[in-house]
Each structure stands twice: as structure tokens, then as C-alpha cells.
Image (cartoon, rainbow, N blue to C red):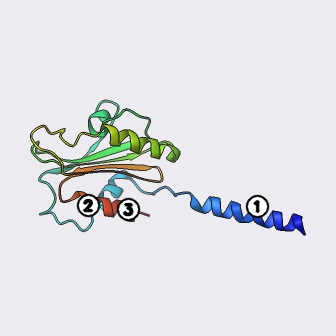
Amino acid sequence: MKKIICLLCLLASCFVLTGCGEKNIEGSLQDIMAKLYEGISEEEKPMLLENIELNNENFEYFAFTNLQYKEAIASESMTGSTAHSVVLIRLENAKDSEQVVKDIEEKANPRKWICVEAENTYVLSKGDLVVLIMSNELAPKIKDNFEKLS
């Protein structure tokens, strides 16, 4: 009887542990970035907003750190006087997300535009995705959209 109870407890703990892991968000970074802007009208978005593919040469400028990643894009206004940046990073390993969030939080500079400063800065993770949001009134909306991703 004790063996059966132990076996049932072991099986139950396996189900609990596997259910606690966060699953990765499927889809291209372009599609996920579009979801981050859902519910935000064109008038609310910064002028000349574009997605920029990140690579080894420009990654640190946008993400403020140098790390191993699978792919990354940044959404920024092409006008230099607009404090708005959303950086979406897909990591090689979701287990690294907590450390990556801490690293970016420590190094992010909401004054990277020199003449303007983002009022809000958020660094969040979900599965193998990490997002850095630096903006003014749009930041909470984008943050909420990221948290709703499934």
C-alpha cells in the first residue's frame, strides 16, 4: 500500500512540475511584434515606426547587452526625437530568460536618444521571448499586450 501511495505522489509531482513551465510563444517575431501593437491606433503610434532586424553589429545598441540569442528585432521611430523602442528577443534557451531580463534591466538607458527620455521602461519575459519596452504613454499598453501573449 505504501508503494502505491509513493508511486501516486511521484506521478502527481511530475504533473505539477511539468505544468509549471512556461511554453514558448509560436510565430515569427514580426507577427509577435504586430500583436504587441494591437489596439493601438496609427495616430497613437510614433511617426515612421519600423521594425529593424538585429544582428551582431547592432544588437547591443538596441538591447544594451551582448548575449546569445536566436533572433531579435527592434521597433523604433525613424525620427530621432521620439523616445520609443520595443526590442523583441528570442533566446536560444528559455532557461536564460530570467538572467537576461536582469542584465537588460541593469543596463537599459531610457535616455539613449540624448535629447528625449522614455518615461516608462519594462523588461519582461515569456518562454524564450524577452521584450524591452521604452516609451511614454504607449509602454503600459504594449506591456499588457505582451503579458496576454499565449
Residue 107 at x, y percent in the picture: 31, 37
Give the label on residue 10, or none: 1
Q: Amino acid at mark 2?
A: Pro
Question: Residue at 20% of width from left, 59% of height from top?
Answer: 138
Which residue does the numbered mark 3 point to in the structure image? 147
**Quadrant where the C terminus is found in the figure:** bottom left
| Callout 2: SS | helix
Q: Amino acid at mark 1?
A: Leu
Label 2 with label 1: CB-CB less than 8 Å = no
| Callout 3: SS | helix
Indicate which disc, 3 or 2, sits on the residue closer to the N terminus.
2
Q: CA distance from mark 3 to mark 1?
A: 32 Å
Q: Is residue 37 visible?
A: no
Which residue does the numbered mark 2 point to in the structure image? 140
Q: Amino acid at mark 3?
A: Glu
Q: CA distance from mark 3 to mark 2?
A: 10 Å
Circle 2 residues within 10 Å: few <14, some 14–19, many ≥20: some
Q: CA distance from mark 2 to mark 1?
A: 42 Å
- Front in this rendered view, residue 92 or 148: 148
Q: Select label 3 or label 1 by which is in front.
A: 1
Question: Residue at 44% of width from left, 35% of height from top?
Answer: 68
Residue 75 at x, y percent in the picture: 24, 49
- Front in this rendered view, residue 137 or 131: 137
